[in-house]
Image: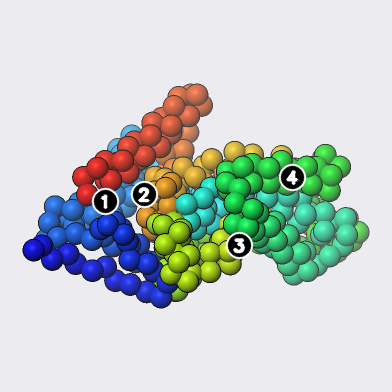
Amino acid sequence: MTHLRTPEKGPGTPAPAGGGTANAPGGDRRWRVPGGRGELVERLFAVQSLFALLVVFVLAIAVSPRRDGEILFLSTENLGNIVRAVSEIGIIAVGMTFVVLLGGIDLSVGAILGLSAVGTATLMVDSGLGILPAVTVVLLIGALFGALQGYATARLGIQSFIVTLAGLQVARGLARIWSGGLGIPIAYGDGPQEAPPAFEILNGTINGVVPVPAVLFIGIGVAAIIVLRKTAFARHVYAIGGNEKAARLSGVPVLRVKVAVFAIAGLLAAVAGIIHAGQLNQGSPNDGAGYELDAIAAVVIGGTSLAGGTGSMGGTLAGALLLGILNNILALNNIDANVQLLIKGLVIVAAAGLQKLRRSIV
């Protein structure tokens, strides 16, 4: 009789029926023969996003334009621009990873970013609030918006795709009503219709090298990795994504977990909106259009399954950076914008294809 290795279990992590998968915060843990082909494949796929990031980085160096013998891609200014550009999408992708691991999708995060950018500008410029009160209100709005979507998904049984598609429209509408349909410019100073000068730090750097938004992105990413690896909450997320019915029967609080996950996604979209307003010195109801698609792309490229229950936060961070490097090197080489879209589309399809290959081999 063949003995199967039992995966690590945490509280609320149901054992898979019929020899399926049981996922835990450390990554995928499957029922497999020790030392078999499945285990080796799993180890290879566990680092697929990091390997892809390394390959793209090396290729970017190879094809980078030169100026006076200097590789433009490797210049400090250019690398700083990459991580600055990635920061907003990356932060949204962190929240999106929780949602996708749950087996859902959130199409509203780009619109929540726009609503948050408008709220940040309006509260500081028109209402005269300080940074802390304005930021607190905006973060609460983002978290509440996400929590309501999570509640509708869990309690009413409506697919998250439909709920968040409606949420996208609602958030855009609220942003346009709040701003009067116009962008709200942010000017800094101590007078009326001016924002506190300290808010301009979001457009600055640390030691003239590392952009502040990049530091926030890295900090949020590291915190999310720790949460996914060390907490019972993460085990519940993986369990629901793997088999919601089994998770419910095992005592996992499905409603609370879903509300919390969508609240996290809304909160992080609001964080990205605040950063967006600080970097562009304005809040517009049209900000963030299409960001949800880039965030989903980063999650998929990072190896997280859209079916839920399988994936890692480190993969998402690598996926976001990969997209940022790809965008940057294509722009440096003056590649036509339409061709850029084609190339990024092919990369996403290739990542999805690897997921399917993974499921067929293991």
Residue type indicated by callout 2: Gly
**Could you tell me if the residues under marks 2 and 4 are in contact, i.e. CB atoms within 8 Å?**
no
> What's the CA distance linking mark 1 and mark 2?
8 Å
Residue placed under numbered mark 2 in the picture: 303
Secondary structure found at label 4: helix
The residue that appears at 64% across and 46% down in the rendered structure is 163
Residue type indicated by callout 3: Val
Residue 338 drawn above or below residue 110: above
- Nearer to us of marks 1 and 3 is 3
Which is more toward the observer, 61 or 357?
Answer: 357
Residue placed under numbered mark 3 in the picture: 259
* Residue 45 badge: 1
**Residue 120 horizontal side relative to residue 240, left or right:** right
* Residue 170 badge: 4
Secondary structure found at label 2: loop
Q: Position of residue 95 (x, y in %)?
A: 54, 57
Say which label, 4 or 1, has the lower sequence index.
Answer: 1
Tell me the crowding category of disc 2: few under 14, some 14 to 19, or many 20 or more residues within 10 angstroms, Cα based.
many
**Residue 263 horizontal side relative to residue 71, left or right:** right
The residue that appears at 53% across and 69% down in the rendered structure is 253
Q: Quadrant of residue 173?
A: top right
> What's the CA distance linking mark 1 and mark 3?
30 Å
**Could you tell me if the residues under marks 1 and 2 are in contact, i.e. CB atoms within 8 Å?**
yes
**Residue 244 horizontal side relative to residue 26, left or right:** right
